[in-house]
Amino acid sequence: MLPGKPYLSLADTKVKENSFVLRWDEHKPLKSYEFYQVKYRQIPNGKWLIYDRDTSISVPSTRIHGLKPDTAYTFKVRITNSITSQEEQFSKESEVIKTKKSTTDFLLSRSELVQQNGPRIYMLPVREIEPARDKIHFTRKYTLGSGGKDDIKKTVLMVGSTGSGKSTLINAMVNYILGVNWEDPCRFKLVHLDKNENNSLKSQANSQTEWITSYTIYNDVSSRIDFSVTLIDTPGFGDTKGLDQDSKIVSQIERLFTAANTSISIKTIDAVCFILKAPDARLTESQKYIFESILALFGNDMRENIYSLITFADGQIPPVLSSLAAFDGSPLPFNTYFTFNNSAFFVDNRNENNTFSKRFWDMGITSCEVFFRSLKEIKTANLSLTSNVLFTRTELNSTSNLLLNEIEFGFDKVRILKNVIEEFRECTKMMKDNENFHYTVQESRNKKIDISGQGIHTTTCLNCSFTCHENCSKSKDEEKRDCSVMDQNGKCTKCPNNCIWQDHSNTHFIFKKELISTRMTYESMLLSYRKAFIKRSSKARKLAETRNEMLQIKSNLLIQKEKIETNTNKLKEIALQPEIKSISPYIDLLKESELREKKPGFNQRLEQLQKAKKQILVRKLCTECISEFDSALQTANELLILDTSILHTDLN
Ligand SMILES: [Zn+2]
Ligand SMILES: [Zn+2]
Ligand SMILES: [Zn+2]
């Protein structure tokens, strides 16, 4: 049986100025080697032509492209056998189908001519959505055409450094969408600058904030795509603008996603496009930082929605891919990417010999085709996980800041405790040095000991008051000449004066030498000891007090560290880019440039950078702080236990 008469499919799309979807009823299933062939003819006098010989149509519908605007066509279909080349009979002819009037013509009448030479360039008549203008965070929205409720809507965020070709790419995309052809005498521009923005760009006073501008091109004016698309143009970043501008851009984008006002905010994203120049063999630190920071805004459900758009491509493998591959750990895709070369979009097309530019134009159109086809297929990401990521990141940052303060406070306390420990030890040493403030003086004294009645004789020198022989056999005084202590001359060998024997007698007592100790005190030492003791007691109290404070701080540190761990782990789980790894080299770069340029306020900014750097290291700092705490606390505890053991017991 023949295929049914072709008809216009109104189910999923509208008739465009140069395309629509054609359907027909399938009366028998095709075999694997059978395909449909579509022929078409311009009404009233056109010849029958085969539509798109190169594509094998195996389902009973196809999008017909490349038609003329405001023109009537008719279609017929037949089945062909790809093996035998046998062709079956054609279906009946379709009704006459007329394409839409050219939107180009429609738009031209409303656009402002901004360049006369080459192809005339027109600024598109975009309309601003007034309530969407956020004057604080510099975000705004423009529209072109008007939207139908059932339109498929796609949102594309465009991010690129200054000179990446972002503006040209956006304009090229718009010309593609609007169906501008190489032969057309006009081109359109979308990227829209206020008058004063123009002036500021001219005067190179670039420090002011630039706008993030969303352009929604509605389906009713688009000709090569069958959905509405919002292109979000972000300020170009990069070294020439001043490095502090870069992080401003990131927070502007963040604001756009998180604004509570729904007129202002963007709630879904289909593609986050990073625009890279094909010849860039290395990413700069600022590129890495911006890319990571922007990727860090999103949830990991966005992985498929991240696009690398490579401009200035020449058909070779772009060198920038290797720099993406080397961009360790980043989810920036370098396996799937889109190449563009927009060099032909705005060049003069009137020169007949300009086949080179025509070829680039065709490449540009093909690139856009591939890109927008992919964009249509990609699953729209709503930004709920993203807002979760942003919330977690905000919490992480504020906890980090709190923790940083606490750590600073903690390190101060450690210093204080260490000082107290030092002073305590000095006191202890002072006490030890002066602990012998008592001393003993010994005197020998002669003591008379009565031995009467014991039957003992003595030889005692009365002259010296000294008992020379305690148990003498000679009892009589006149016999003392023969006492064993006397020498041959009759002189005593014992008593201090070696008196003659006649000075000695037998006494009923003996003289005994006795040592008498008297305890004396060094007053100055006692004073020092006392002073040290009192000081040490107060240091011990201070020690205990500081230790208790530190235990409290330590428990705070641990709680906040735990919070940070939790949020960090949560980000690892849900964020596309959990950690901005390039922030450290980026901060170094900023510091270098601040130090080099010394622009007003650089000191303050350096301080902020220092803080930012600390914030990255907050977990490491916290661990260090806690370990210092532990060692200082242990010392303090040991000292406090020892405290009582060295005390002097008789401190009188
Ligand atoms: Zn004797
Ligand atoms: Zn004697
Ligand atoms: Zn004597």
Image: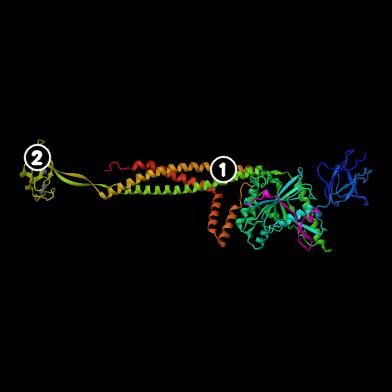
Type of amino acid under label 1? Glu
Indicate whether residue 127 is drawn in magenta. Answer: yes
From the top left corner, tell me how far across and down residue 220 is, in percent: 79, 48
From the top left corner, tell me how far across and down residue 529 is, in percent: 30, 47
Residue pictured at 83% horizontal, 42% vertical: 10
* Closest to the observer, 210 or 622: 210
Q: CA distance from mark 2 to mark 1?
A: 97 Å
Q: Quadrant of the N terminus?
A: top right
Q: Which mark's residue is nearer the viewer, 2 or 1?
A: 1
From the top left corner, tell me how far across and down residue 508 is, in percent: 9, 39
Residue pictured at 50% horizontal, 48% vertical: 405
| Residue 519 relative to residue 267: left or right | left
Residues at badges 2 and 1 in contact (C-beta under 8 Å)? no
N-term mark: 2 or 1: 2
From the top left corner, tell me how far across and down residue 16 is, in percent: 82, 48
Outermost residue toward the top in this view: 453
Mark 2, secondary structure of its residue: loop
Q: Quadrant of the C terminus?
A: top left
Is residue 341 at all visible to an observer of this figure? Answer: no
Q: Which mark is residue 508?
A: 2
Q: Which mark is residue 77?
A: none
Outermost residue toward the left in this view: 478
Q: Is the residue marked 1 within 8 Å of ligand 2, measured from its CB? A: no
Colour scheme shown = rainbow
Mark 1 is surrounded, within 10 Å at the Cα level, by few (under 14), some (14 to 19) or many (20 or more) other residues, namely some
Q: Which residue is mark 1?
A: 565
The part of the image, by quadrant, that contains residue 365 is bottom right
Magenta residues (range): 106-135
| Residue 247 relative to residue 636: left or right | right
| Residue 366 relative to residue 626: left or right | right
* Closest to the observer, 593 or 434: 593
Mark 1, secondary structure of its residue: helix
